[in-house]
Every structure is written in C-alpha cells, then in structure tokens.
Image: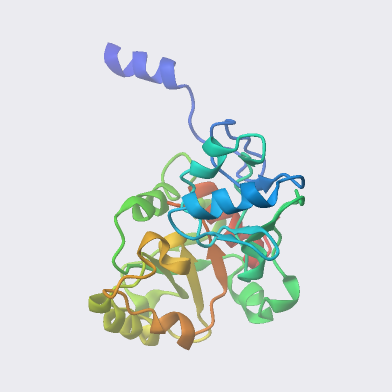
Amino acid sequence: MFQEIKILKQHGIQYVPDLRKVELTGLFRGRPVIDKDITSEEEDLLIDICPSAAFCKEPFSLNMGKCVFCKACAFALPDRIKFTNDYKIASNTLEGLIVVKGKDKPVELDKSLIRPELRRLFKHSLKLREVSAGGDNSCEMELNAAGNVNFDMGRYGFEFVASPRHADGVVITGPITENMAEALDICYHSIPKPKLVILAGTDAISGGMFHNSEALNRVFIDRYPVDLYIPGNPCHPLTFVNGLMDLVEIE
C-alpha cells in the first residue's frame, strides 16, 4: 500500500481534463518550422541527411507525412529548423502536411472536403477498427494509450472495436505489407457505409523508412479515399484524438 501511495504522490493525477488545451514539454517533437533564411547549401545538406526523403527542394519544404521525426535535421542545423511542441498536426489532405520554409502556422483541416454525413452521423459516436498492416507496434501502442485513463477518448464517443462489422471506419497503422494487403481490403469492405479511412503514423501515410521496400503493397491507398492523415512516428494520442475531434467537429 505504501508503495502505491508513493507512486501516486510522485506521478500526481494523470487524467487530462481537456485534450484541446494540453501544453506538452518543449522536448516533444511536434510541428516543424523551417527558417526563411536557410541557404541553398543548407537545404542540400538537409536533403542528404534525411533518412526518409521528407525534404523537397522546389519550394524547399518538409513533408510531415514522410518525416520520421528523428530530428537529424534539427541536430545538424539547430538555427534553421526546429520541432515545436504543437501536436495538432492531423490533416485531411496531403498538402496540409507540407511545411514550407518561412511559414509558421498551425495545421488545419480543409472543412470543404469533409463529407457532411461524417459530422452528422459520427459526432457523438465513432467506432473504429484498427488494422496493423505491417506496423512495428509503436503506433499501435499510442492508439491504445488514447483510450487509457490519461486521455480517455471514450468520453467523446471514440472507441476501437473488435469487428469491422461494428465499425464506422478503419484506422491503418504500418506501411501496408504485401501479406496484409488482402486482409486490409477485406476489412474495409466489411465495414458498412458510410465509412472512414484514417492513416495513423508516417509508415501508413507514406511508407516511412520502408517506402522503397519491395515487401510493400500500397494499392489500397490509391484505391480508396482517405479522410484523415495523422503524422508522427509514432503519432501521439493527443494528435490522434484532436484529429478525430476536428474531423467530426467537436469543440
């Protein structure tokens, strides 16, 4: 008993009362910002050292959908690029994941692209089937954490379910390997309409470090529309839950 009391005193109350207003430590690797005065030589350096080819030259930008948030770029040029503690980085377009040099603004969903039925039907109850399509279990653990006593996404009606028959959409983690491609397709078609597709984590969005691997089969991404991209390697529970809240319009 004394050990439990000691732990409780050390950790304090961990329940997060408002997931919209949490301020994370400065050590958190959230939305990146690129200095507007970065030189062409420095741009080339960052392109060379990035392990996941997340940088683009014209215009110079960083794609959060490819970024593994390793901070190799920030370590190399701390005066030119930094990772903020902004965790609200989910987007419903791939273009929304692009960070252009000299621009420091939050990521917002394009409301004009959100299907009206999603907000009408799922605002108070959203059941999701999570499929680990070749994931390494890091993103899967973070999604599990979204439902624990700290974040408690169930208070908003968000819940993971065991069967696609009971789900309103699918959350995909992992780069989608060949041996999971058919299973993922079967899962998608087992979900009743209307349904959502959510890509959680860099691996799911772009393939991440494995984007050139012959072991992948990402035909699913080209075949079906995606409603929400949640970057991160892995994505943080706050990023996931806030992304869902924005999608179904919960204040």
| Number of numbered markers | 0
What residue do we see at 36% from left, 77% from top? 164
- In this view, the residue farthest toward the left is 179
Whether residue 37 sits left or right of residue 213 in the image: it is right
Q: Quadrant of residue 115?
A: bottom right
What residue do we see at 30% from left, 54% from top? 137
Q: Is residue 127 visible?
A: no
Whether residue 238 sits left or right of residue 141 in the image: it is right
- The front one of 187 and 44 is 44
Residue 98 x/y as whole percent:
64, 62
Q: Is residue 102 visible?
A: yes
What residue do we see at 61% from left, 76% from top? 118
Classify 241 as above or below 217: above
- The front one of 166 and 146 is 146
Residue 49 x/y as whole percent:
48, 49
Residue 21 x/y as whole percent:
67, 40
Quick one: quadrant of the N terminus? Answer: top left
Q: Quadrant of residue 6?
A: top left
What residue do we see at 54% from left, 77% from top? 226
Whether residue 185 sits left or right of residue 104 in the image: it is left
Residue 67 x/y as whole percent:
51, 55
Q: Quadrant of residue 90?
A: bottom right
Classify 86 as above or below 127: above
Classify 243 as above or below 192: above
Classify 118 as above or below 173: below
- In this view, the residue farthest toward the front is 41
- The front one of 87 and 44 is 44
Quick one: quadrant of the C terminus? Answer: bottom right
Question: How does the figure colour the protein chain or chains?
Answer: rainbow
Whether residue 89 sits left or right of residue 214 in the image: it is right
- The front one of 46 and 166 is 46
